[in-house]
Image (spheres, rainbow, N blue to C red):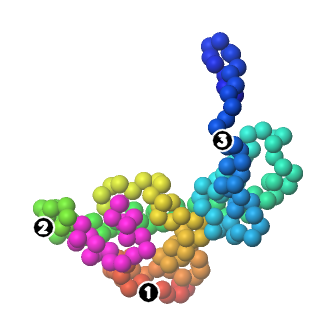
Amino acid sequence: MTGLLLPEFRLLSAPSRRHYWAETRTRFAPALGRAVDPLDLGWEQLEAVHAPPPRPAESAPGGHDRAAPMTAALERGEEALRRIEALVMEEASRVLAELRARADYEALPERQQGRLYAAAIGSSPVAGLLHRARRGALGAGDIRRVLRTPRAAMDVASKLGIEGDPELRYVADGASLGGPAEHERST
């Protein structure tokens, strides 16, 4: 390992305790393999392959072509995450507005409010995210922690009717995301 000591601009060098480059290569080897579908890789692996090399001389010939499917997978997954986040925030606001319309909701203790909210949203692929949104604690990384791969994000988006077959749309009929979803062909 090498470092630069400032303000003297003195170079320092010390032996490394581990071979960091070999560890990094091993960690992201699945992302570079041909047998793995990029949609099944984790966000961190896709971002590591998608990131530009530190110096152009370090990039392997044809490396950019190998990263193209991974970049596409990352973009498709991130689009699904954006759609899920928008739907979760919208649904959380809608359910909270319905519950707050009841005179006694605000007077209830936090645990009881949570129980009523859980009953209102039912069993949903994004129930945990809806609860975080209710508490105002839904951050950018929360959805990625729950949906660990682009395929998982795209599958949930498809189940919610916000991605996939463009002719299908989700019809709530007053039900929450976890309620009985009815899909209709839009005309």
Q: Which mark's residue is nearer the viewer, 3 or 1?
A: 3
Quadrant in which the N terminus appears: top right
Residue flagged by tag 2: what amino acid is it? Answer: Asp
- The reply to whether the magenta stretch includes residue 117 is yes
Residue with the most extreme top position:
8
Q: Which mark is on residue 182?
A: 1
- Residue, x 80% and y 54% (percent of image)? 64
Residue flagged by tag 1: what amino acid is it? Answer: Glu
Q: Secondary structure at mark 1?
A: strand
Q: Which mark is on residue 139?
A: none
The residue indicated by pointer 3 is 18
| Count of all numbered marks drawn on residues in the image | 3
Report if residue 35 is visible in the image. Answer: yes
Mark 2 or mark 1, which is nearer the start of the sequence?
2
Mark 1 or mark 3, which is nearer the start of the sequence?
3
Q: Can you say whether 174 is above or below 61 in the image?
A: below
Crowd tier of the residue under label 2, counting other residues whose Cα lies within 10 Å: few below 14, some 14–19, many 20 or above? few
Q: Main secondary structure of the magenta part?
A: helix
Q: Is residue 170 left or right of residue 37?
A: left
- The reply to whether the magenta stretch includes residue 86 is no
Q: Are marks 1 and 2 in contact (CB under 8 Å)?
A: no
The residue indicated by pointer 2 is 104
